[in-house]
Amino acid sequence: MTTTADPRAVVIRYVEAVRDGDADVIHDSFAADATWHYPGSLPVSKVWQGRDAIINEFLGGMGTVFVPGTLEIELVSTIAEGERVVAEWTSKAKTVHGGTYDNRCLGIYTVRDGKIVSVVEYADTHHVAATLFPRP
């Protein structure tokens, strides 16, 4: 598996792997002790600790609220300075609750030695709550 140490290339490769459903590249993108902070008051809002928790619990858990095969991710832009990369992307999908998820997201990634070591993600959490975690 080809890896690169260029932070911007690491983040682009990761986002494209999520878009393409490439589990091996997604796993390879993170350091074992990486963190992912999803601020807010949603069921998924917290600091996720470690690659396995990020991939299996956070990302994997979010995948269960989308109708399989409907998720579309498009990388809009990236800005890089040293080991920090800001990536903006759109996510669209049909939800298992019958709604349409359509959000614009921003992540601040820190990359060291070719691996993502931390992410802070921002999104419209009101839209996330209404479409992915609707109250009965």
Image: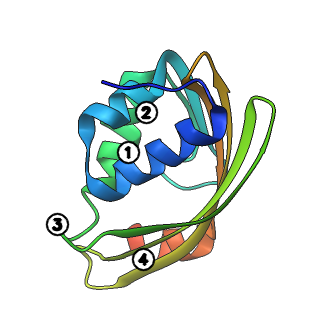
Upstream in sequence: badge 2 or badge 1: 2
Q: If the image is split into quadrants, where does the C terminus sit?
A: bottom left
Instruction: Please provide percent x and percent y for residue 58.
Output: 40, 41
Asked whether disc 2 touches disc 3, contact meaning CB atoms under 8 Å apart, the reply is no
Give the amino acid at mark 1: Leu
Q: CA distance from mark 4 to mark 1?
A: 16 Å
Q: Residue at horizontal 43%, vertical 33%?
A: 54
Mark drawn on residue 54:
2
Q: CA distance from mark 4 to mark 3?
A: 16 Å
Asked whether disc 3 touches disc 1, contact meaning CB atoms under 8 Å apart, the reply is no
Q: CA distance from mark 4 to mark 2?
A: 21 Å
Give the amino acid at mark 4: Thr
Q: Residues within 10 Å of mark 3 (few under 14, many from 20)?
A: few
The residue pinned by badge 4 equals 131
The residue pinned by badge 1 equals 59
Instruction: Please provide percent x and percent y for residue 19.
Output: 35, 58
Instruction: Please provide percent x and percent y for residue 69.
Output: 18, 69
Label 3's element?
loop
Q: Is residue 120 above or below residue 31?
A: below
- Res. 44 visible in picture: no
Q: CA distance from mark 3 to mark 1?
A: 14 Å
Upstream in sequence: badge 2 or badge 3: 2
Can you tell which of label 4 and label 1 is closer to the viewer? 1
Q: Residues within 10 Å of mark 1 (few under 14, many from 20)?
A: some
Mark drawn on residue 68:
3
